[in-house]
Image (spheres, coloured by chain):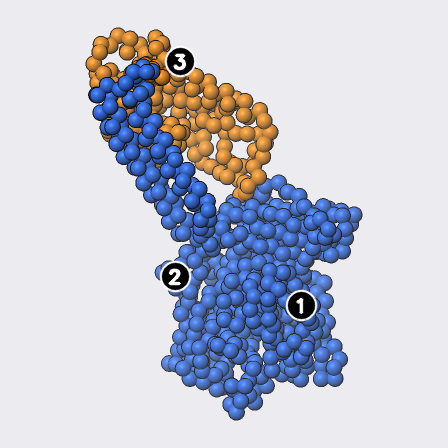
Amino acid sequence: MLYTVGTAYLHTRGMRGGQFYIVAAGVTLLFLPMFGRALRMKWGMTAIALSYFFIIAISNWVLQLFPAEPKLGPILTHTTHFQPGNFPVLLFIPGLIMDRLLQREGVNEWRKALLLSVSFVLVLLIVEYPLSGWLIESPGARNWFFGAGSWYFGDPPDFPFRYKIHPSWVSPPPVLALSLLIAIFVGTLTARLSLRWGKWMQEVRR
Amino acid sequence: MDAGGTAMKKVIHFLPVLMLLVKSSFAHVGSPDVAIEGMAGPYHLLVSIKPPDVIPGTAMVTVFLQNSSGATISTQPVYFFSGREGAPSADILPPVAGAPGTYKGIVWLMQDGSSSVLLHVKGRLGEGELIVPVVAVSTAQKKLPASTGIVLILLGIFLFVLMVTLVGASVGEGITNSGESLPVHRKRSKRIAFAVAALLSSLVVYGGNAWWKGWAGKYSQFMFKPMHATYRVDYELSTNNLRMTIDTAHSQRKASLSYIVPDHGKLMHLFLMRMPALDVFAHLHPVRQDTASFMAILPPMPKGKYLAFADIVYSSGFTETLKDTLTLTTDITSEIFPDPNSFNPHARLDPDDTYAYALPDNLIGTLYQSDNNSIICGKPGAGVKMKDGSEMVMEGPPQGGFSNGQLYQLHFSVYDDKKQPARLEPYLGMQGHAVIVKNDGSVYIHIHPVGTYSVTAQTSLLQRVNRPENEYNYPDRQRFRDSVDKLVTALRAMPEQERNSVLMRQMNMPADSMSGMKMDNTVSFPYTFPQPGLYRIWIQVKRNGRVLTAAFDREVK
C-alpha cells in the first residue's frame, strides 16, 4: 500500500526533479533490503526488482491489446485501446549493484544501510535521468514496448510538452544535489529499518 | 448608414462568436430542473432533466416522445468547453416499462460549467437530434449516512486492534518456538511494539482525517457560490435612477463577467417583486455602465422592500440569477425620464421595460389603483383582466392539483373583451415570458415557451459543439465586452421590427419567420415545480403593440 502511494510521485516526467529520488529511496529501500534478506538468496534484491519490472511491463504490454474507449467527458484525446502506464523503473540495475555490495560487506548494519542508500540513489540517477529524457522525447520510445505514446484522454493531444521536457520538471543542479543528499539520508534510515525487518523475517518461527 | 448600422458593422467580426453563444436562459433560484419542448428532427419531444447537485454526478433524463413509438433514444453529455468532439459515445436511454413513449436514464456530468445533453432519436420517422442545455454546478455537500459511518467506525476499530496485536505478536510469539513461553526481554519488546504500533496507527488515522478534511475544504471552494449585487436609488440624478453594483470581490466568476452576452437583445433581465405579497412586479433591462455596474430607470412603484432577481447569461451558455433585495424609501409616482440626449446617454428607460400591480387590496385609494397596469390575480377558475381589457385564462390544474417534481405544460389563453380568441404578437422575440416565484421568494425562474425559441438557441449551441476545436479559447476580454456593448446599444436604438429582424438574422433565421413559431391566442410553458408551496406565476405577452401582464396563484403539493 505504501509503495502504491509512493508511485504517485514516481512518474517518468519527474525523474529530472529531486523529489523523485527522495521518494524512490524512501519507499524502495523500505522493501528491497527486507526482501533480499528474507529470501536468503545471493541475488535476492535483483530477483525482486526484476519481478517488479516484469509484472508492470507485462501488464502494460497486455493491457494495450484490449479495445477500450473513454466514457466520461470531456475527452480531448480519443483512444481506442487501453493506455499503458509508465515504462517501469529499472530497479533491477541498482538491485544488482546492491546485492553485489552486500555480498562483500561485514556485519555493521548501519554501514550496510548507508552503502545501500548511496549506491541505490547514485545508480538510479545514472540510469533514470537520461532514460527519462529519452522516453519522453525520442520517437523511438513511442511503441508498444516502451509505451511512451500513451496519453490520458482528458489531456489535449497537442500539449506542447507531451514529447518535450518542461523546464519546471527539471531541478537546477544545486537543488538536485541537495535532494540527492536528502534521498541518501532518508534511504539510509529506511534501509536500516528494512534490514532489521528482514532479520525479523528470518527469525519468524510461527 | 445610421449610427446603429455603423455599430453593427463594427461588431460584425464578433457576430460569429455571438451567434454561437446566445443561448436559452435557464437562470433560476432553487429551481434547477430543466424542462424543454422541442423537435429532434421529425420527433416531437418533451424533455425533463434533473441535474446533479454534486459534480461529477449523474443527471436524471426523462424523455416523453410525443408523436411516434418504438424509437431508440440515446444520450451524450456535451460540454461547452470541449464540444461534440470531446463527448463520449452515446448511450441508449432505456424505455420505461409500461409507459409507452417514455424513456428514463442517467447521464454522467464530469465537469462543472455550461454543459448539455445531446439526444439522438432513431426510428420509423428517420433520425433527429435535440440539444438540451444544462448548467452543471455543485450546490450540495453530501453527508455520510449515519449507518455507514457506524459500520466504518466499527471496522476501523477492528483494523486498529488487529494491527496493534499483529505487531505485538510479531516481535513476541512470532519469533518464539511454538510451546515455549516468552522470555522476559521479548515480553518487554512486545509491550514496546504495542505502544509504537498504537502510536503509529493513531498517526495514520489522524493523517487520514486531515487528508479527508483537506479534500472536503477543496470541494467547498469548488462549490457554486451565487453572486450578489447591491442596489441603490441615485437621488442626485433623479428619484427613479436605480444603480446596481455586482460584488466582484467575493465572486468566483469575476473574470467571466466581461463575457456576459445579451439574451434576446438585453444584457440583463431584472425582475423586481415587492415583499411580502409579491403585489408589485417590474421587468427591467438595466444598461451596463462598466463590467460590474448597471443602471435602470424605475417605473412608478410604491415604496417597500423588493426582491430583485437579475438574470445574466455568459458566453459559455452558463446562466445565473443574482438574488438580492432592494428597499425603496419613497413612492415613485411618475415616470421621470432624463432626456436621452442629455449628459448621460445611458439614462433612459429601455423600451421593453414593463411593470404591473397585482392584488391591489393594499393599494386601494392610491394612484397605483387607477393606473391601468393594475390586475386582479387569477385564482383557479378565474381569468385575469389585463390592461387592454382582454382576459387571460390559465388551464388546469390537473385532477388532484399540481404536485412537485412532476413535469407540466402550463397553458394560457387570451380572449378579447368580446370573449373571442385574441391573437398575440412576439414580445422580445417570443410568444410570451413567464416568471414563476414561490411566495417566500425561495424559488424563482424566468422561462419561455420553448419549441421555436429553444430550437434557435440549440442551433447556436450545436454550431459551437460541431466546431472542430476540441478546446474553446475565449476572445480578448476588453474587445469582447466593447463589441457586446456596441451591439446592445445599437439594438436598443432600433425600431422594434428592425431589431427583431436583426436578432433573427443573427440566429440564422429568415427575417419573415419565427422559425415556425405559431402565434395564436395561446402560450404554454413546460415546468417542474421543485417543491410544495404557494406559487405566483407572472405571464407577459404582447398584443396590439402593448405588453400585457397577468398573474396567477397556484398551490403545489
Do labels 1 and 2 touch, CB within 8 Å? no
Give above or below for B470 relative to B255.
Answer: above
Chain for disc number 3: A
| Neighbourhood count class around disc 3 (C-alpha, 10 Å): few under 14, some 14–19, many 20 upward | many
- Could you confirm whether marks 3 and 1 are on the same chain? no
Q: Amino acid at mark 3?
A: Ala
Left or right of B87? Residue A148 is left
Secondary structure at badge 1 equals loop
Camera-nearest label, 3 or 1 = 1
Measure the alpha-carbon separation of dots 2 and 3. 61 Å
Q: Which chain is blue?
A: B
Q: Amino acid at mark 1?
A: Gly
Q: Residue at x 42, y 70 (%)?
A: B244
Left or right of B555? Residue A161 is left
Chain for disc number 1: B
| Neighbourhood count class around disc 1 (C-alpha, 10 Å): few under 14, some 14–19, many 20 upward | few
Q: Which mark is residue A23?
A: none
Residue in front for this viewpoint, B412 or A122: B412
Q: Which mark is residue B400?
A: 1
Q: Residue at x 21, y 21 (%)?
A: B185
Q: Which residue is mark 3?
A: A47
Q: Amino acid at mark 2?
A: Thr
